[in-house]
């Protein structure tokens, strides 16, 4: 995760396993759009296409629950040098409550 996403995850009271569960719970109808996002250290920044999703998520059960609020805004993509490989690195760009953007 990038620095902002890491801070957002901590503010949610989540850990990396919660983020993984949320990503696995994403369904097609949660998709919002794809955005170009800057990732990496300032001297080696690159842009990646990242898919954004909005979903209700039950952290305790690790499942999607669209009745659950607040909804979570989750945006992630893959490192460009790893796309298409079996060990591609997933980059979490955003993970916060809906409407709480930095």
Image: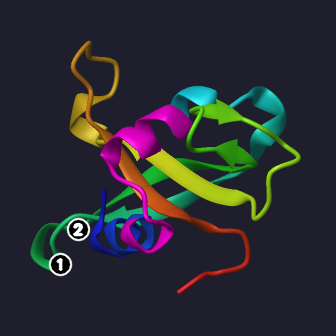
- State yes or no: residue 74 in magenta: no
Q: Mark 1 points at which residue?
A: 42
Please state the horizontal and vertical placement of residue 79, each as a whole percent of the image.
29, 42
Q: Classify 10 Å Cα crowding around label 2: few (below 14), some (14-19), many (20 and above).
A: few
Query: Foreground: 82 or 69?
Result: 69
Please state the horizontal and vertical placement of residue 67, each as a whole percent of the image.
88, 47
Q: Is 100 left, or right, of 9 in this rendering? A: right
Q: In the displayed structure, would residue 73 be above or below residue 29?
A: below
Based on the displayed image, in which of its 4 quarters is residue 44 positioned? bottom left
Residue range (magenta): 10-22
Based on the displayed image, in which of its 4 quarters is residue 47 positioned? bottom left
Q: In the displayed structure, would residue 14 be above or below residue 102?
A: above
Q: Mark 2 points at which residue?
A: 45
Give the residue at the far left of this rendering: 43
Please state the horizontal and vertical placement of residue 23, each as a whole percent of the image.
53, 36
Give the residue at the far front of this rendering: 60
Q: In the displayed structure, would residue 36 be above or below residue 80?
A: below
2 and 1 marks in contact (CB < 8 Å): yes
- In 3D space, how far apart are the residues under numbered discs 2 and 1 (Cα atoms)? 5 Å
């Amino acid at each position: 995760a990038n620095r902002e996403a890491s801070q957002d995850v901590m503010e949610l009271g989540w850990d990396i396993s919660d983020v993984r569960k949320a990503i696995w719970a994403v369904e097609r109808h949660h998709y919002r759009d794809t955005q170009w996002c800057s990732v990496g250290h300032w001297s080696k920044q690159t842009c990646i296409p990242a898919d954004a999703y909005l979903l209700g998520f039950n952290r305790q059960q690790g499942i999607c629950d669209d009745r659950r609020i607040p909804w979570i805004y989750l945006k992630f993509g893959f490192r460009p040098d790893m796309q298409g490989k079996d060990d591609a690195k997933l980059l979490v760009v955003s993970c916060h409550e809906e409407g709480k953007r930095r």
